Amino acid sequence: RLSLTNAGQFPFDFEWSLGNSRFLAAKPPRGKLQKGDTATVDLIFHSEREVSFNELPIYLNIGPQRYTVSLSGRAKKPRLHFSFQRWSFGPCFLSREGVPSASHELTVVNNEVTNIELDCNFQSQPQLTIEHQ
């Protein structure tokens, strides 16, 4: 996360140039800062495969000025353990209120030394309960 502050007398436009990188994004990628304003920019590194880079140049364009920022980073597959990869409930009776329904709990264990962020793309529903700690 970066902060850009306009300490000058006039408003300016800014824009990030990340080259052809498929695993970097800037949010927001561009904007306008009035005198005295500050903008927070998130540089997001996201890769679905192992990748590393060293001193990768990205550019911040403010008017005719171009500022270079060199980034280094590495993505690797996290050491997560899932209690199962597939589950079939098999034939089940339709449940009604008060009758226990078929259920099974998926547990995900982080075996990394550091914390990781795990996003779940599902919302709790009557037939699916999502709980995280």
Image (cartoon, rainbow, N blue to C red):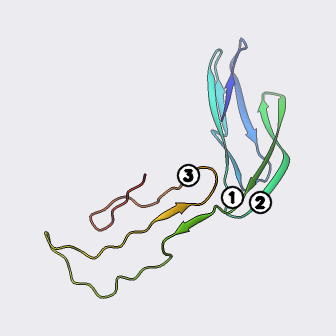
Disc assigned to residue 117: 3
| Crowdedness near tag 2: few (<14), some (14–19) or many (≥20) residues, C-alpha within 10 Å | few
Residue 39 placement, left or right of 63: left
- Left or right of residue 69, residue 112 in this image: left
Q: Are marks 1 and 2 in contact (CB under 8 Å)?
A: yes
Q: Mark 3: which secondary structure?
A: loop
- Disc 2 residue type? Val
Q: CA distance from mark 1 to mark 3?
A: 14 Å
Instruction: Confirm or deny contact between disc 2 and disc 3 (CB under 8 A).
Output: no
**Mark closer to the observer (2, 3):** 3
Give the percent coordinates (x, y) of residue 54: 85, 49
34 in relation to 84, above or below: above
Q: Residues within 10 Å of mark 1 (few under 14, many from 20)?
A: some
Residue at position x 68%, y 58% from top?
47
Q: Are marks 1 and 3 in contact (CB under 8 Å)?
A: no
Q: Which residue is mark 1?
A: 47
**Is 82 rendered above or below residue 14?**
below
Looking at the image, residue 28 sits to the left or right of residue 57; the answer is left
Tell me residue 133's x, y (percent). 43, 51
Real-space CA distance between mark 1 and mark 2, rounded to the nearest whole angstrom:
7 Å
- Where in the figure is residue 52, as x and y percent of width and height? 80, 56
Residue type at mark 1 is: Ser
Q: Earlier in the sequence, mark 2 or mark 3?
A: 2
Q: Which residue is mark 2?
A: 51
**Residue appearing at x 20%, y 80% in the figure:** 94
- The CA span between labels 2 and 3 is 18 Å
Residue type for callout 3: Glu
Seen from the viewer's position, the closer of residues 6 and 96 is: 96
| Element carrying mark 2 | strand
Q: Residue furthest bottom?
A: 91
